[in-house]
């Protein structure tokens, strides 16, 4: 007779935590070098397709989204950590994309789905800093093998749009090293909106200052809006998260502090599934401010690739084993969707011009 997972076991946490995270994605994949030769960007495209991605010109993950523009202002602390020109300008232009993590472009907004924020910051000299951040606290994978197995387990049932709980439990049971990631995902408190959420890089990066000193960091975009918990139930409007963001931007700018958590000796800098020390120093290196929203059907952010390995001098990749794969899969996704006929996005230009929530939608 099969036994149920023991109370407190990783498999038990996974049965509770990973289904919404698989639906919500934790699809901030990551990369490094392909380990088995059989694992290629094309194989990942197949995994995303089986997870519910549509061949209609959409991204293979983070498919539902909306664009925003604004600026980035660095701090003196950022200039001290990195020689990059990104930290020497003022009001540098920013292109951002808020999205839901799953590969489902027509997924109705709901409180359980993971969210993401991608950004491009450019200097007048053409330096380019791209970020891909999610609101999950840790990755539910540590390397390429985990990533491939994760997306196999996360395959969605066409009828329920949810993964098979047994596949998720098996994924967790075979990977005891992910226990902390499951625990933190379970305790993560979702916010009410995209506007007051904090988004994390999960992967680590290396800053180099004018003297050549290197500092390993993880990024977070920390909202200046006050925290409010997510509602206990969904709302009537399938675009309520995006409409609330537009409503707020119509009234005032929205800002996020870009915070670098500085690694200390002993922090697992090459493993995005593991937490760093709670006592690590946190430094605000700048602030991103968004002022205007766009449907991605009408914005250059729609086709943009937010590859987090596109970095300016003074910011480099670490030996995190997931960053190379992530870059390769992003480019494969771009090539695949660029060859397809793009159907209209769920967040339409009409939603941007008139972001009125469906009657009885929460937060009006």
Image: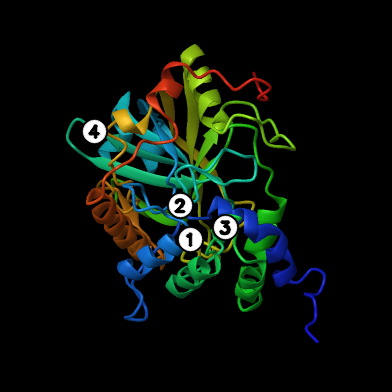
Q: Is residue 272 left or right of residue 30?
A: right
Choose mark 4 or mark 1, whichever is in front: 1
Sooner in the amino-acid sequence: mark 3 or mark 1:
3
Q: Secondary structure at mark 1?
A: loop
Name the residue at 64% across, 52% down.
278
User: In which quadrant of the rendered view does residue 342 lie?
Assistant: top left
Q: CA distance from mark 2 to mark 4?
A: 32 Å
Q: Are marks 4 and 1 in contact (CB under 8 Å)?
A: no
Q: CA distance from mark 2 to mark 3?
A: 10 Å
On residue 22, which mark appears?
3
Q: Are marks 2 and 4 in contact (CB under 8 Å)?
A: no
Vertical placement of residue 255 versus 155, above or below: above
**Front residue of this view, candidates 115 and 23:** 23
Judging by the rendered image, the residue that carries numbered circle 1 is 51
Q: Is residue 116 left or right of residue 2?
A: left
Instruction: Give the farthest residue toward the left.
Output: 125
């Amino acid at each position: 007779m099969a036994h149920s997972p023991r109370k407190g076991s990783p498999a038990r946490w996974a049965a509770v935590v990973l289904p919404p995270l698989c639906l919500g994605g934790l699809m901030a994949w990551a990369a490094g070098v392909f380990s088995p030769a059989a694992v290629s960007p094309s194989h990942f495209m197949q995994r995303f397709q089986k997870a519910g991605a549509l061949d209609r010109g959409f991204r293979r993950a983070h498919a539902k989204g909306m664009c925003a523009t604004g600026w980035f202002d660095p701090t003196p602390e950022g200039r001290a950590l990195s020689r990059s020109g990104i930290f020497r300008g003022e009001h540098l232009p920013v292109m951002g994309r808020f999205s839901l993590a799953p590969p489902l472009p027509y997924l109705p907004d709901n409180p359980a789905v993971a969210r993401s924020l991608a950004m491009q910051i450019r200097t007048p000299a053409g330096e380019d800093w791209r970020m891909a951040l999610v609101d999950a606290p840790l990755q539910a994978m540590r390397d390429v093998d985990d990533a491939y197995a994760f997306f196999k387990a996360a395959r969605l049932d066409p009828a329920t749009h949810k993964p098979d709980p047994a596949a998720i439990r098996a994924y967790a049971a075979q990977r005891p090293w992910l226990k902390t990631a499951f625990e933190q995902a379970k305790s993560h408190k979702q916010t009410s909106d995209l506007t007051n959420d904090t988004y994390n890089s999960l992967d680590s990066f290396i800053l180099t200052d004018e003297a050549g000193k290197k500092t390993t960091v993880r990024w977070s975009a920390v909202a200046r809006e006050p925290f409010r918990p997510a509602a206990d139930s969904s709302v009537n409007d399938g675009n309520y998260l995006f409409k609330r963001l537009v409503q707020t931007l119509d009234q005032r700018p929205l800002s996020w502090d870009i915070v670098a958590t500085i690694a200390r000796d002993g922090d697992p800098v090459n493993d995005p599934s593991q937490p760093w020390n709670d006592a690590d120093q946190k430094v605000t290196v700048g602030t991103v401010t968004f002022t205007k929203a766009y449907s991605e059907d009408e914005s250059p952010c729609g086709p943009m690739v937010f590859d987090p390995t596109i970095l300016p001098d003074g910011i480099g990749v670490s030996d995190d084993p997931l960053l190379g794969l992530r870059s390769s899969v992003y480019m494969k996704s771009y090539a695949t969707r660029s060859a397809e006929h793009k159907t209209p996005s769920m967040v339409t230009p009409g939603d941007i011009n008139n972001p009125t929530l469906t009657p009885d939608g929460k937060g009006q």
